[in-house]
């Protein structure tokens, strides 16, 4: 065994799945810090590709300028650019992609072409009632967007922002009926994706009902185990 292969750490090519309010973004940021992996949220990637003026970014821009959805093959191309970039050599964290089984299959083909593979799809499981409790309790300041939570981070005075004194409101996105609709959409789209990764033996469920620190600890333990298994 050469020194090079001894030093080589196995890749962590991760997909994050979970409903809105599951803390997916928070966990993604922690993973990024703990494992020094780039964290790619699809919306951000598209915006960055457009900003950096990559050829695929240009194509994506054309669709967006027309007010059309960016087609799968363009998104896959943009993700592919990122996955092949030097910063993602040891792995990456994808959030918001793939969203459909079609996209997951395309990602698999892309990875095969690079002689790499997905290490795991992490599903942060949170039940619907908890999502409504987490998102529905948010209060947003109308003036500067400061965010409070009636249960977890209550303002000193009801309906008044502690920071700037502006009025606090429930954003449309945080209204229970809107949250339920977002959850329905999530379940419709994500269930087939969860089955897809389950069939491939790549799905890892994490209990998202726990405190964020504990969720983070469990994810770290899970990834450490995966790395060990891969090295054996
Ligand atoms: Zn405020």
Image (tube, rainbow, N blue to C red):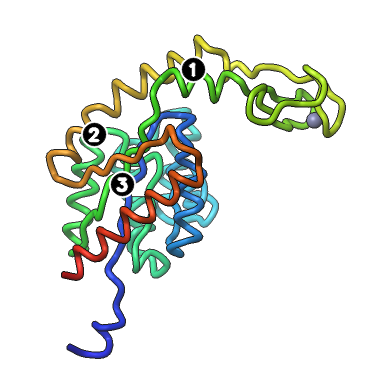
Q: Is mark 3 within 8 Å of ligand 1?
A: no
Q: Cβ–Cβ below 8 Å for labels 2 and 3?
A: no
Q: Residue furthest top?
A: 177
The answer to whether 81 appears left or right of 163 in the picture is left
Q: Residues within 10 Å of mark 1 (few under 14, many from 20)?
A: many
Give SS at disc 1: helix
Q: Residue furthest left?
A: 199
* Quadrant of the image containing the N terminus: bottom left
Residue 19's spot in the image, x, y percent? 40, 29
Query: What residue is disc 3 on?
Result: 76
Q: Residue furthest right?
A: 165
At horizontal 64% and vertical 19% (from top left) the residue drawn is 171
The numbered dot on residue 130 is none
Residue 128's spot in the image, x, y percent? 41, 20
Q: Residues within 10 Å of mark 3 (few under 14, many from 20)?
A: many
Residue 175's spot in the image, x, y percent? 57, 13
Query: What residue is disc 2 on?
Result: 194
Q: Residues within 10 Å of mark 2 (few under 14, many from 20)?
A: many
Give SS at disc 2: helix
At horizontal 60% and vertical 16% (from top left) the residue drawn is 172
The answer to whether 172 appears left or right of 75 in the picture is right
* Distance of label 2 from label 1 (alpha carbons): 21 Å
The numbered dot on residue 179 is 1
Q: Does label 2 or label 1 sit earlier along the sequence?
A: 1
- 51, 84: nearer the viewer: 84
Say if residue 187 shows up in the picture.
Answer: yes
* Distance of label 1 from label 3 (alpha carbons): 28 Å
Instruction: Tell me which corner region of the image, top left, top right, bottom left or bottom right, holds residue 6.
Output: bottom left
């Amino acid at each position: 065994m050469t020194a090079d292969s001894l030093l080589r750490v196995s890749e962590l090519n991760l997909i994050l799945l979970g409903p809105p309010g599951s803390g997916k973004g928070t966990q993604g940021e922690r993973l990024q810090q703990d494992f020094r992996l780039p964290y790619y949220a699809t919306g951000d990637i598209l915006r960055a590709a457009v900003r950096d003026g990559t050829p695929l970014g240009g194509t994506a821009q054309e669709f967006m300028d027309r007010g059309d959805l960016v087609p799968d093959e363009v998104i896959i191309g943009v993700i592919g650019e990122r996955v092949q970039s030097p910063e993602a050599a040891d792995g990456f964290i994808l959030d918001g992609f793939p969203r459909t089984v079609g996209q997951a299959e395309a990602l698999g083909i892309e990875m095969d072409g690079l002689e790499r593979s997905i290490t795991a799809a992490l599903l942060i499981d949170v039940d619907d009632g908890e999502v409504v409790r987490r998102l529905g309790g948010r209060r947003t300041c109308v003036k500067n967007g400061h965010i409070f939570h009636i249960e977890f981070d209550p303002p000193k005075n009801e309906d008044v922002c502690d920071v700037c004194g502006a009025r606090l409101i429930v954003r449309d996105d945080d209204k229970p009926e809107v949250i339920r609709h977002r959850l329905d959409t999530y379940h419709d789209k994500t269930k087939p994706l969860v089955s897809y990764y389950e069939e491939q033996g790549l799905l890892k469920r994490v209990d998202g009902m726990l405190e964020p620190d504990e969720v983070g600890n469990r994810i770290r333990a899970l990834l450490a185990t995966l790395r060990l298994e891969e090295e054996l």
